[in-house]
Image: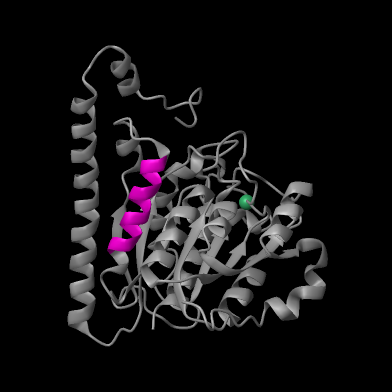
Amino acid sequence: MLNVGRRGIHFLQKLNAENVPIELIEKGQKRVIDASLTLIRERAKLKGELVRALGGAVASASLLGIPLGHNSSFLQGPAFAPPRIREAIWCGSTNSTTEEGKELNDPRVLTDVGDVPVQEIRDCGVDDDRLMSIISESVKLVMEEPPLRPLVLGGDHSISFPVVRAVSEKLGGPVDILHLDAHPDIYHAFEGNKYSHASSFARIMEGGYARRLLQVGIRSINKEGREQGKRFGVEQYEMRTFSRDRSFLENLKLGEGVKGVYISIDVDSLDPAFAPGVSHIEPGGLSFRDVLNIVHNLQGDIVAADVVEFNPQRDTVDGMTAMVAAKLVRELTAKISK
Ligand SMILES: [Mn+2]
């Protein structure tokens, strides 16, 4: 069992030791997992039917929240991010139109299938191997309702592994990944945890789920990060050379010859001046406009995306980073929907 010794040791494990029959616990876990997947399946089905009935959408973003924070190496606040991001998406201080003119109120542009109930599932003693499978399964349920495409609200960065795995398995081949982050998240394992938020891209590359992985915004990388990057053929663009790389990164063309493009945005790719509400504050990052320029100008078929590592417990009192994360989600919505 991973993460023993951390917060969230399940009382059910203790019951196990007290001669409660294992079958009783396993049957109960299965019922909770089935119920969790049923709610997502039925919501995805309804939203998919709605969008298809309205007609005219080739691709449409659908929010899927994954409130998971326990694979963080430092703070666990990203578990609380999805409701804060949703609140900020619909905040009355701004209108519901994206910069290039997409209407977020139109279900053909954006729908929501709710959250994977991560804490409720873990509370039943479900381990991370199984939890990661449930996350993958949930992503696939959204993809089974075309034209819906998953736009995932993290959660810490560990969720990108099960999400990308699901996208690649469902589409039947690898994707190209644009990954914006201060960190490469490519440790073989971090503090013994292979599902750590610092290891998700090692799992993705090992699994063969990505052809190209472009990491942008990198400014906290050590020897292992560079070696692992080399080992997996990762294209690492570090902040220290950003002014040189800018014109290339603002004119990317990805996903040709593979199943499409996946975009993963760690909020800490931004300079903390723009987004202070993150667990790992790393000065010297991208501006908000840098990120938007890269995303807006990217040519490719965006099959899914995530926004991760927003930590509401570190945000300013006026929720500035929530608005930043929400605007990233809004602009990714515009990029996915067509
Ligand atoms: Mn990061």
Query: Dividing the image into 4 quarters, which one contains the C terminus?
Result: bottom left
Look at 56% across and 56% down and name the residue there.
206
Look at 73% across and 60% down and name the residue there.
230
Residue 66: percent from left, percent from top: 39, 50
The magenta stretch is: 129-141
User: Compared with residue 2, is residue 172 higher up or lower down, i.e. above or below?
Assistant: below
Q: How is the image coloured?
A: one colour
Look at 50% across and 59% down and name the residue there.
307
Q: Is residue 244 left or right of residue 257?
A: right
Residue 229: percent from left, percent from top: 70, 58
Dominant SS of magenta comes to helix
Residue 118 occupies quadrant: top left
Query: Number of numbered discs present?
Result: 0
Is residue 112 something that shows in the picture?
no
Residue 240 occupies quadrant: bottom right
Outermost residue toward the top in this view: 18
Task: Tell whether position 110 is magenta.
Answer: no
User: Compared with residue 290, is residue 251 higher up or lower down, i.e. above or below?
Assistant: below
Q: Is residue 71 left or right of residue 149?
A: right
Query: Dividing the image into 4 quarters, which one contains the N terminus?
Result: top left
